[in-house]
Amino acid sequence: MKENPVILIVDDEEDILEFLKYNLKKEDFEVHTASSGRKAINLAQKVNPDLIILDVMMPELDGIETCKEIRDLPGMSNTLIAFLTARNEDYSQIAGFDAGADDFINKPIKPRVLISRIKALLRRNNPLIKNQVFETESGLKIDRNKYLIELNGKEITLPKKEFELLALLASKPGNVFTRDTILTSVWGTQVVVGDRTIDVHIRKLREKIGDKAIKTVKGVGYKFEQ
């Protein structure tokens, strides 16, 4: 994740803007706010945010339409957009994802949960994870661009989720990834899976690359060691 990611918050309620801005600035994010969809579109072009937190229910131009227009802006096709909503109807989320949303964050907002979700989203969009080539002392090579795994020069074919899980863990050797971080980064928040899903994928990875590289941190998650 780059230093001081830029976040644009869009909501027509001033108290929500101030609440979110206060909590995000405490985490050293660069925060900009807009009180309408039209202002958000103009501001997005100026500040080029890494993430836009966008309220669904706004007057004049609602969040869905704002999202569609932002997605059409030059350079904004890959910008992360998370909808902020108190509505849980399926059709609202479907419309949001169709418009180009990456995630939904429900009101009322708990600051610690919000920060965790934002950091997970930014990790998913991290070019260091998506583009970097990892090579370890044990002879494992991970090429995120080519979707390629090699072990001691021999190519290994992995299903998509196993590949993404391995690439995530190997992106920061020695770093412990919690189960919540793994679930959000690899499966996303719109897909409901259990802890057992992670365990199964870890077991399959160990069968293919050996059981020494991926270590279990009991009660927390997993880490990759070279």
Image (cartoon, grey):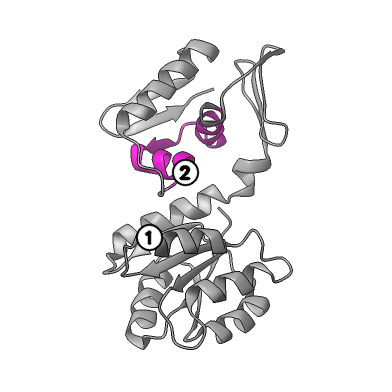
Q: Residue at x 55, y 52 (%)?
A: 1
Q: Is residue 208 visible?
A: yes
How far apart are the alpha carbons under marks 1 and 2?
14 Å
Q: Residue at x 59, y 49 (%)?
A: 126
| 69 vs 189: above or below | below
Q: Is residue 210 visible?
A: no
Residue 198 left/right relative to 74? left
**Element at badge 2?**
helix
Residue 144 left/right relative to 208? right
On the image, which quarter does residue 55 sit in? Answer: bottom left
User: Where residue 203 sits: x, y (%)?
Assistant: 41, 17
Q: Which residue is mark 2?
A: 185
**Element at badge 1?**
helix
Query: Pointer 1: residues within 10 angstroms few (<14), some, or many (20+)?
Result: some
Q: Earlier in the sequence, mark 1 or mark 2?
A: 1
User: Where residue 219 sits: x, y (%)?
Assistant: 25, 31
- Over which residues does the magenta segment extend? 163-188
**Residue 175 counted in the magenta span:** yes
Q: Residue at x 49, y 24 (%)?
A: 225
The image quadrant where one finds the C terminus is top right
Q: Amino acid at mark 2?
A: Ser
Q: Amino acid at mark 1?
A: Ile
**Residue 53 counted in the magenta span:** no
Q: Which residue is mark 1?
A: 115
